[in-house]
Image: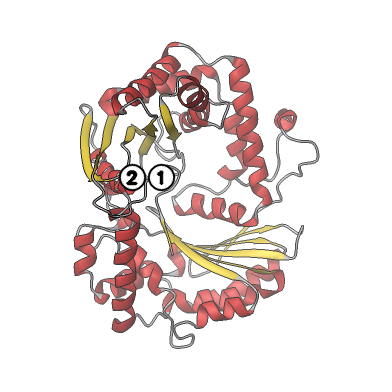
Amino acid sequence: MQRRFIPLLFLSLLPFGVPAAPAVYEHQLANGLKILVKPDHRAPILTSQVWYRIGSSYEHGGITGVSHVLEHMMFQGTKRHPSGTFSRIVAEQGGEENAFTGRDYTAYYQNLASDRLEVAFELEADRMRNLTLGKKEFAKELEVVKEERRTRTDDDPQSLVYERFSAVAYDASPYGNPVIGWASDLDQLKVEDLRAWYRLWYAPNNAILVVAGDVETEKVFELAETYFGPLKAESIAPPKTRGEPEQLGEKRLTVKAPAKEPYLLMGYKTPSAADASEPWEPYALEMLASILDGGDSARFSRDLVRGRQIAASVGASYSAFERLPGLFLFDGVPAKGHDLDDLERAIRAEIERIKREPVAESELERIRTQVVAAKVYERDELFHQAMQLGLLETIGLDWKLAETYVDHLAAVTADQIQTVAKKYLNSDRLTVAVLDPQPLDGRSRVTTPMSLGGHGNVR
C-alpha cells in the first residue's frame, strides 16, 4: 500500500535503505472526476489508471456479467478511434494496456514512458463517453465472454466450487453473483443493456484517475483538465444494496464435477474495513491469515503440509478492502492417504488452537516483520502503488488509509488476533463446500489450486 512516510517506530522492521513513499496529490475537476497523482522519479515510466465505481456487486438479477462484458466492449472503439485502434496506438508508443473487472470496480490502465501520458488521457477520455457499442461487435465479444466462462468456471472444478459456494454463502449480498455472470444471464444479455449500463456508470463523476510515476503533478492536472474536463457528468443514484442477514447456522454443499482430486472450501462471514465494529479488527484478521498461511514457515505449511502431511495444499485468505462484508476463506486439497474430512478437522483444529492459545510474541514478531516488509516492498512497483490508491477510493475509503496501512498491521497484538478468531471464526458463520470428483471421461480438467486472493476477471 502507499504511504508518504514510514513512522520511526517501525523503521527497525524495514531493510536498510528502503526509501519513504512519496506524497500523493489530489485534485477534482468541475465535472466530478477525482485525480490522484503520485510522483516517483526513479525511472522514466508511468502508469495511468481509470477506475469506475461499478462491478458485479452493482448488478441485479437478469443482467449479471454486464460490467465484465462492457469491459470487453471498451476496446471495440469510438468514432474517433475505431475498433483495434486503441491497442495499436498504445503498442506503437511502446506501452502496454489492459483492464480488469471485480465485484466493486472496473479499471483500465496503460503503462507507458513518462513522456507519453497525453496519449493515455486522449484515449481514455474518448472512450469514457463515446463508445459506439455496435451490435456486431457486441455479439462477437459476448461469445468471447461465454467461452471465457466455460473455460475458467464450467471446466475448472475448483472455480466451479467457488461459484456455487458463494451463491450459498451469501443469502442477500450481491457478492453471491459471479463477476463473469451467470450463464443464463449472459444468454439473454442485449446490447441495449450494455448501452444503458455504460451511459449511467461511465461518467467522470463516477471515476477516479490515478497516475503514478515520473510525472509533474501540475502537468498531470492540466492534461486531465484538457481531455477529461469537457466531459459531462451523469446523474447517478447510488444503488440500494440488500444487507446480508445474520447467518443462523452452518451451511454445507457438495459439488459433483469431473476432476482428478477432491477439494475443500470454507468461508466465515467477516466484516471489511468499511463496516467493522472496531477499526483494528480487519488488520487483526489479515494478521491471522498470515499466521496460518504466511509462507513456508507459517502454521499450515509447517504443520499440515510438511509436518503431519494431511494436506497436499492448504491456504487462508482475507481481504480488508471490499465495499461490502466478505469472507475469511480456507481451501485445500488432502494429501494421499487422507480425505476431505481429515483436512477439514485439521483446519478446524488450527482455528481452535488460535482461540485457545494466544500467538507467542516471537511468532507474531516474525510474521509481522514479513508482512510489513512485503507491504513496503510493494511500493517499488508503480502499478501496485496506483492500484491501491484506486481501489481504496473506488470502494468508498479514503486513499490516505494507504499511508497508515502498514502502521495498523504492525500494531496488531496477539490478544486482538485471538479476539477476532473467537468472534468471527465460529460455525454459525461458516459455509463449507466440497468437491466430489467425478470420472473425467477423457476430458481435460484444470485442478490446480485456485487463488483465494482475487476473483475478478482480467481481459
Q: In the rendered image, which residue does mark 1 sit on?
A: 450
In the displayed structure image, the side of residue 449 where residue 264 appears, left or right? left
Q: What residue did someone put label 2 on?
A: 158
Q: Are marks 2 and 1 in contact (CB under 8 Å)?
A: yes
Query: What amino acid does circle 2 point to?
Result: Gln
User: Above or below — where is 180 with respect to 254?
Assistant: below
For the point 52% across and 29% down, the residue is 287
Q: Is residue 225 visible?
A: no
Residue 458 in view, yes or no: yes
How much space separates mark 2 and mark 1, taking CA atoms?
Answer: 7 Å
In this view, the residue in front, 391 or 330, is 330
Q: Percent x, y for residue 148?
A: 34, 63
Camera-nearest residue between 65 and 404:
65
The quadrant holding residue 365 is top right
Query: Would you say 124 lies left or right of 176 here?
Result: right
Tag 1: amino acid: Met
Q: How busy is the neighbourhood of tag 2: few (under 14 within 10 Å), some, or many (20 plus)? A: many
